[in-house]
Amino acid sequence: MERIGEDFLVIKFSDGRELLWSKKFIDWEVREGDRIKIIVSRQEAKNDFPEDQAKNLLKKIFQTNNA
């Protein structure tokens, strides 16, 4: 941790770049000089209504009882 501002932390990378990070997203005690680990990963979006459910629902809606 490079320094701590009023509303943000300044994270300095080994190549000299700096990242401002909002304090409201930090839920632990942090002090200047602390080393932190940042992980960036890709996460699939959660689909609350799977395609199969949607297809089945449409089939029921448009189903006719013509025999």
Image (cartoon, rainbow, N blue to C red):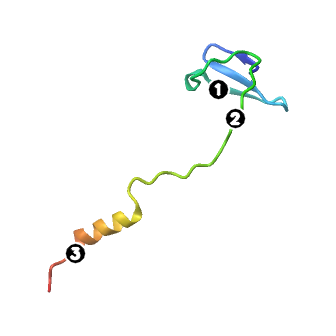
How crowded pointer 1 is (Cα within 10 Å; few <14, some 14-19, many 20+) is rated as: some
Where is residue 65? Give x, y as percent: 15, 79
Q: Label 3 is placed on what type of residue?
A: Gln
For marks 2 and 3, give the one nearer the viewer. Answer: 2
Where is residue 12? Give x, y as percent: 77, 26
Tell me which label, 2 or 3, sits earlier in the chain: 2
Tell me which label, 2 or 1, sits earlier in the chain: 1
- Label 3 secondary element: loop
Q: Residue at x 18, y 77 (%)?
A: 64
Tell me which label, 3 or 1, sits earlier in the chain: 1
Q: Quadrant of the C terminus?
A: bottom left
What residue does disc 3 label? 63
What residue does disc 1 label? 21
* Closer-to-camera residue (50/6): 50
Query: Of all residues shown, which one is farthest toward the top?
Result: 6
Where is residue 58? Give x, y as percent: 29, 68
Which quadrant of the figure has residue 22?
top right
Q: Residue at x 14, y 83 (%)?
A: 66
Q: Label 2 is placed on what type of residue?
A: Ile
Q: CA distance from mark 3 to mark 1?
A: 53 Å
Q: Is residue 17 left or right of residue 21?
A: right
Q: Can you tell which mark lies on residue 38?
A: 2
Which quadrant of the figure has residue 7?
top right
Which quadrant of the figure has residue 21?
top right
Q: CA distance from mark 2 to mark 3?
A: 52 Å
51 shown above or below 67: above
- Label 2 secondary element: loop
Where is residue 39? Give x, y as percent: 68, 39
